[in-house]
Image (cartoon, grey):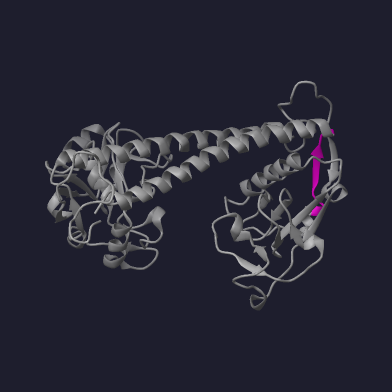
Amino acid sequence: MSADKKVPAIRFKGFHEEWKSTTLGASISYTKGFAFKSSDYQSYGIRIIRVSDLTQNNLSESSNKIYISRTEASLYSKYVINNGDIVITTVGSKAEMRESAVGRAIFFTKSEDYLLNQNLVKVTPLINNDSRFLYNQLLRKQYAKFIEDIQRGNANQANIAISDLWEYSLNSPINKKEQTQIGNYFQKLDTLINQHQNKHDKLCNIKKAMLEKMFPKQGKTMPEIRFKGFSGEWGEIELSDEVTFLNGRAYSQEELQDKGKYPVLRVGNFYTNSSWYYSDMELGDKYYADYGDLLYTWSASFGPHIWNGDKVIYHYHIWKLEISENIDKLFLLHLLDYDRAKILSGSNGSTMIHITKTAMESKKVFIPKKQEQIAIGNYFQKLDNLINQHQQQITKLKNIKQACLSKMFV
């Protein structure tokens, strides 16, 4: 943005006017949600939208839906969520917990009838304001920071006063056509993101189903689905017969450096933690992981991984797996992935599970001959590649969106 004029860094051709300063409250009309009686709930009719029904930026389609009858709903027309309405949560977790944050905004495209429950407010832009343009204003970092400043309460239950919310300052083009073009641009980005997300999720579901069918179930010695040309029972082994589990090195905090020769791979680096520690220590070969090594995180979040980075020292909460020539690495990766899913299914979904080395070494599994292992491993590797391609596109498009939210607004 220019230091002297309220204009965005990137703009559609044909628009030159300076943007005007306004507030959220001056740009909208609003309706607060209604406290529907639980005694009126039923399993069909008009759906009531609650705070818990909203994800970070979408309406959840979970099975835990509540409805009231159409006859009863006719008494509450004021609370109908219309196409193009923006719904904002007035209670939730603290703003930094984005998935459930107070103040998060959801754009509604009307595919069915919905009613607005308490602790939500629906926002309808005034006639000279474009709905999608306004919605994307509420996805910017400036808005998240504003919510952090006005929220009250604790991490588990924060709230905002709508009188404070309406004071949010924003800048807007005078020409509604410019607003509409910006809104349409972000709609196209969101459509692309959703398309890749849907394909990603579909492939993940296919993989989950095929893991169930291409490995023997409990008490069985053959899978339900096999590649052509393979038959006969799978043989039972103890993992320690064919796999050696090597412990990583335990580090004290004083031994970890901000810079150094070798990155130290910790469990969090596989999941959400992008920060790294380093070490200059020269250790035995067994303490290093190289590109292509099969690793297993066994503390807190757990499961198998192929390491696809440069040489690292792997931390104590990670095992490196040395595999005999009788076992295909990709087959073992997905066998362990299937085993992980079975463990999770018996733990109420918690990933905070510690798997002991002794338990893994003594685990009995069924495996086919090497050629069938290779076929299975390659099949799942192709699925993983497709899943990763869509995830990379999702990440790329979300990064583009964040950059545009910065450059295309004032």
Q: Position of residue 284 (x, y in %)?
A: 82, 65
Above or below: residue 344 compared with residue 220: below
> Dividing the image into 4 quarters, which one contains the C terminus?
bottom left
Horizontal side of 39 relative to 295 (left or right) equals left
Q: Position of residue 90 (x, y in %)?
A: 27, 57
> Dividing the image into 4 quarters, which one contains the N terminus?
bottom left
Task: Verify whether residue 366 appears in magenta.
Answer: yes
Q: Position of residue 137 (x, y in %)?
A: 26, 50
Q: Which residues are magenta?
A: 361-369
Q: Residue at x 77, y 43 (%)?
A: 329
Q: Residue at x 33, y 63 (%)?
A: 158
Horizontal side of 383 relative to 108 (left or right) equals right
Q: Position of residue 270 (x, y in %)?
A: 61, 55
> Going by the picture, which residue comes out furthest to the bottom?
254
Nearer-the-camera pick, 178 or 143 = 178
Horizontal side of 395 relative to 173 (left or right) equals right
Q: Residue at x 22, y 37 (%)?
A: 82
Q: Is residue 228 visible?
A: yes
Horizontal side of 399 relative to 127 (left or right) equals right
Task: Verify whether residue 160 appears in magenta.
Answer: no
In terms of image quadrants, where is residue 231? top right
